Image (tube, rainbow, N blue to C red):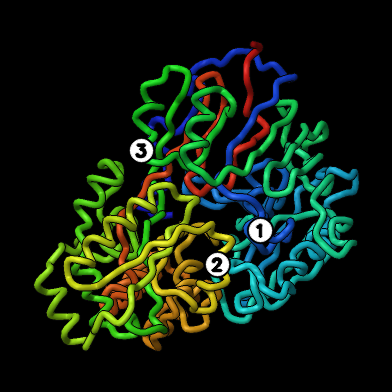
Amino acid sequence: MPVGLVALLTLSGCGFSGEEGGSTQAADRDQRIVVDNFRAPVADWALESDAAYILSLSGCLETLTRYDEAAGEIVPALATEWEQVSPLEWEFTLREGVQFQDGTALTADAVVTSLRAVLDAEVPARAFSPAVVSGVEAVDERTVRITTPAESPLVPYRLASVNTGVLAPAAFEGGSVDPFGHCTGPFTPVSEKPKQSLTVDRNEDYWGGEVQLAGAEVRFITDGATRATQVQTGEADVSLSIPAANVAALEADPAVEVLQAESPRTATLYMNNGRAPFDDVDFRKAVRSALDLDALAASVYEGAALPATGPFAPSEPWAIEGAEAPQQDVDAAKELLAAAGYTAERPLEIIAIVERAEFADVATVIQENLKSVGVPVAITTKEYAAVEPDLLSGDYDMVLSQRNRLIDIADPIGFLTADYTCEGTYNISHFCDEEYDRLVEEAAGTADTEQRYELYARAGEILVEQAVNVWLVNEQAVDAVRADLQNHRQDPLSRYVLRAETSKPAS
């Protein structure tokens, strides 16, 4: 793994709670904690959906491989080793002695049942779909074979995606997926308040060692200010995704630790390239020229984020060489609007996703910037779950959102394929370019890491040249925890929170 990627995802100095490098107090194994998460499952518990992230961060769902965010590499999890046995086949050897929480054994047949449920879903996971995986089979009791339609060096990365988490066969016997008692992780779900919370208890028979907490409640709280308040009052022990406006107050509280890490996440103004006036590249460039990203980063983000140079952060090893953040140029914006033949026939709508508290203020700044060049804008705030169908169908103008480039798999091929190829399953920009697709397809089959990264950068250049979206600021992952929480490690990719070693001392 190149040094650049390791540096990108290595936790910052304050990304670990507890006495790193020193001793911690003896754990009180009767303690339970509360975790405030920023999203709720939107598709019951289907593994191909974002519900898999909830099950993973709750300490329930585990995968064959795992992306170690500190080391920047794929490491063993439910599989202990893997090998590419032919150009189109990979084999994974399962760990011995692992049991599901219902007491049944982890076998190759069980893994195949779970992975095929994702592969055969009506809307498969972006990381594990028929486009990239053509077959899953059991070779013997402890060996699973993954077949791909084309040679792929990234299969171990795909098996680290939370969407490829493994549940016991009994989880799939009903009309919907049932994770309760059917995971392998350190915690087992025991009760749920739909769209409110998930309660988990310790898995006494966890294969990975003694679990230090008795259990936890994971709350689904979309309002960022509420998450910040609850960790400060002690109602929550961990609060994920803290808004920039709340960081200073939390840092001043000795009972709270603020954890920050570099994150491959960029706040983005998505534009619907398939709908007028955004179907004209000059209009999209005009929007980009009208925005003052420096002022946006300094005001709304209070200096905690940097103006974006494009779809990648400059620190990433696949970043576009020499790329600079666009500067506001009102005169150029007006000239581009004229070239596009734009007339203000209706206000254009910006949807601000409420799960990101700062987006309402970001929308206001953009509204003022665009007003100055003669583009009227109306602002709407909605929960992401309510707006996603319109985004995918192309029934919108602009939306403020953010995507973690490594969230599907820990390599940007997932993001570049799903978000911007002509047939991408999350192409909410509704962008299509043959040369871009060719570069991404070539990259997907390129084993040499440096060559693959060069292809990513060239694909990124096309996105910038076509002004597909306006990438606003590169964000940090900011979480907050109670100061007495021990052995908690921040995950910039928001997949792991409750771990076996997480603990609290006696009160």
Q: Residues within 10 Å of mark 2 (few under 14, many from 20)?
A: some
Q: Secondary structure at mark 3?
A: helix
Along the line of sight, which residue is nearer the eye, 13 or 222?
222
Q: Residue furthest top?
A: 507
Q: In the figure, is residue 103 to the left or right of 208? A: right
- Whether residue 69 is visible to the viewer of this picture, yes or no, is yes
Residue 76: % across, % down: 64, 49
Taking the image as shown, residue 218 lies to the left or right of residue 182, namely: left
State which quarter of the image contains the C terminus.
top right
Q: Is residue 3 shown left or right of residue 340?
A: right
- Location of mark 2 (residue): 388
Q: Which residue is mark 1?
A: 42
Q: Earlier in the sequence, mark 2 or mark 1?
A: 1
Say whether residue 21 is visible: no
Q: Earlier in the sequence, mark 3 or mark 2?
A: 3
Q: Residues under labels 3 and 1: Cα distance?
A: 28 Å
Residue in view at x 66 percent, y 17 percent = 27
Mark 3 residue type? Ala
Q: Which residue: 89% across, 56% down?
A: 170
The image shows residue 212 at horizontal and vertical percentages of 70, 25
Instruction: Find residue 245 and name its label.
Output: 3
Question: In the rendering, at what x and y percent does residue 20 appear?
Answer: 48, 23
Q: Secondary structure at mark 1?
A: loop
Q: Are marks 2 and 1 in contact (CB under 8 Å)?
A: yes
Residue occupying the point 79% across, 65% down? 112
* Badge 3 density bin: few <14, some 14–19, many ≥20, Cα 10 Å: some
Real-space Cα distance between discs 2 and 1? 11 Å
Q: Amino acid at mark 2?
A: Glu
